[in-house]
Amino acid sequence: MKDSLPHYPFDPQRCMGTVCEVTPQSVKVNLPEAATPDGQWLYGNRLGRGEVGEFVVVESGEHAIFGRVINVKLPERERLTVEPGLGKAVAAHPVGTIQLLATVCLKNGKVSGGIANFPRLGCRVYAAHPLLLKWLAEAKARTASEAPVLLDLAFLPTASDTTVNFTPENLFGRHCAVLGATGGGKSWTIARLVEQAARHHSKIILLDATGEFHTLQLPGIRHVYLGPDPSPTAEASEVVLPYSKLTEIDLTALFKPSVQTQGPKLRGAMKSLKVVKLAPALATDGCFIKANKKRQPFEDAHKQHVAVVESLSADFDIDKLSRQLDEECVWPSGGTQSSPDYASWGRANDQERGYCVTLISRIEDMLQSKELACVFKPKGKVSLFRELKTFLKSPDQNVLRVSLKFLGFAHNAREIVANAIGRHLLNLARDGEFRQKPLFVFLDEAHQFLNKSLGDESTKHHLDAFDLIAKEGRKFCLNICIATQRPRDIPDGVLSQMGTLIVHRLTNAQDREVVEKASGDIDRSAAAFLPTLAPGQAIVIGVDFPIPLTVQISKPDHEPDSEGPDYQGCWSTPLEALTTETPVTVESTPNEAVQSDTSPPDDDVPF
């Protein structure tokens, strides 16, 4: 036992009470010192002697049972004994409830979840030493290897000098989720995880939804961004995600055609542009003009390249899409009504053209949009997928941070682009690209990208790339770590795949219920501590952790830029003082003055 446990669990100086009632999930304990105003100190470690949230060890024969104090109270007849102003003090007899969590065999030090042997009445209860908690949390890490790779993530709130280390297998082996309300410390946790993993030659892709992780300055980190950065810096490089890497379904979700006429015409236009790219002889100025044209040459080219044309790829000249869409609006056959010529298309159909006018205008506007230039105007810029390929092959790069801050929300572009990134990574994983070097994907603000469907019932497009990574990526050495402040917006199927949960403060009852359902290692008693966690504190839950352990996340070396505006400074300073530009006075010429005098008043200016 001495070789297994770092500290004797039944130290008489740490005894705090005796068991007076036993149930299948908990025990009640007499806590004679719980009514004192403050705890005690023993060799530099604080003893709560009966505080809610305190971890304890209960005697049970050849086993030690770890538990946590979840309730402390006085018998009703003694509740006034803690009021010193009511007269002579009377002895109090506090009673506490301890939730039973895990069992340690004293013979071999083996840790197992659940209760192997229930304590008896009169068994003593001891305050758990910090080293025992550290030993318990690192139980799987010790069995992984004699000298495992350890990530210095946190320390115990009651003993700041007692760090808690985890292995990559513990945290990421079965995927990981960092949950918590705003201000709870999610960003700190993500930054700390990335920093620690980067020290061990890992391969990490950080999808930064808000741009707050631009402060990470680590050896081997590469910063890139999508979208128009108004203040570009040398630390980050602009990349594009060409529309050709999207699918027809992605483009359909972007352009949002109506179901009746616009949808079929859009699909037909994309297929026509694929055909003319593979058979340029059929093209007229890059498009295929169908009105009054023979079908046979087009159908022969389609048959020859049917695998490419009927695929979901979007490899065509999108600048011609709006015009080709107009060319698709023809009658299905030529000739007269009495003798139709099915060998040719008919003349232009003005009615269908009228139906497609709004879609054509929408496509033209989106193709010229600055926010979507990273998708529709990729020429002359580095593709994100090429940057990703370089990153995966480079032995000197450990972290690739992709900022989505400047990619707009309009037309669901951000969700579609992020889904395309996830789909590309999953395809690489299925091809075995990560067998030798596992890849970790950190998805910040995951509620923006998961459980998303675009379109109506008849044209619904599920953005399920990251859902599939959570469900099947692990067998291909592709693991994901999601971070969100809204666990209730994450699909149950995804959250249930997270083997490790790092849960910060959660104040919403629905969010806590989701966490309880997603993990069998936390019940309502443990979830009750979530709203009271201090900033930076988190409960670590997972299949590799025998108990839900509360830790304080260590401060990252490079804090993320997640602070809000300085309201005191902004609101107390007049707007004129914040303006740096000096107004320029332009002297008008005599002719300009005359022109100004003879100009009509504002009310007479036509709209």
Image (cartoon, rainbow, N blue to C red):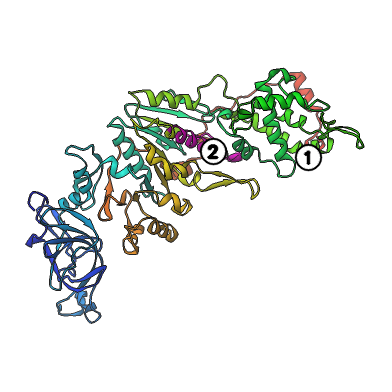
User: Quadrant of residue 426 in the image?
Assistant: top left
In the image, residue 554 sits, relative to residue 66, either above or below, namely above
Q: In this rendered view, identify the residue nearer to me: 405 or 139.
A: 139
x%, y% of residue 128?
16, 58
Q: Is residue 464 left or right of residue 33?
A: right
346 within the magenta span:
no
Gap between marks 2 and 1 measured at Cα: 28 Å
What amino acid is at disc 2? Arg
* First along the sequence among labels 2 and 1: 1
Residue 607 visible in this rendered orientation of the protein:
no
Specify the quadrant of the image occupied by residue 437. Answer: top left
Callout 1 secondary element: helix
Examine the rendered structure and indicate whether residue 173 appears above or below residue 26. above
Per the image, label 2 sits on a secondary structure element best described as: helix
| Residue ID at (17%, 57%) | 104
Over which residues does the magenta segment extend? 403-428
Question: Which residue is the site of mark 2?
Answer: 414
In the picture, which quadrant includes the C terminus? Answer: top right
> Which amino acid is tagged 1?
Tyr
Q: Is residue 66 left or right of residue 169?
A: left
State whether the magenta stretch is mostly helix, strand or loop. Answer: helix
Q: Position of residue 578 (x, y in %)?
A: 50, 35
Q: Which residue is mark 1?
A: 355
Can residue 55 be seen in this snapshot? yes
Q: For this view, does 164 lie left or right of residue 597?
A: left
Q: Which residue is found at the position 20% from the left and 63% from the top?
A: 116
Residue at left offset 68%, top offset 27%: 302
Q: Residues within 10 Å of mark 2 (few under 14, many from 20)?
A: many
Work out whether 21 lies above or below 421: below
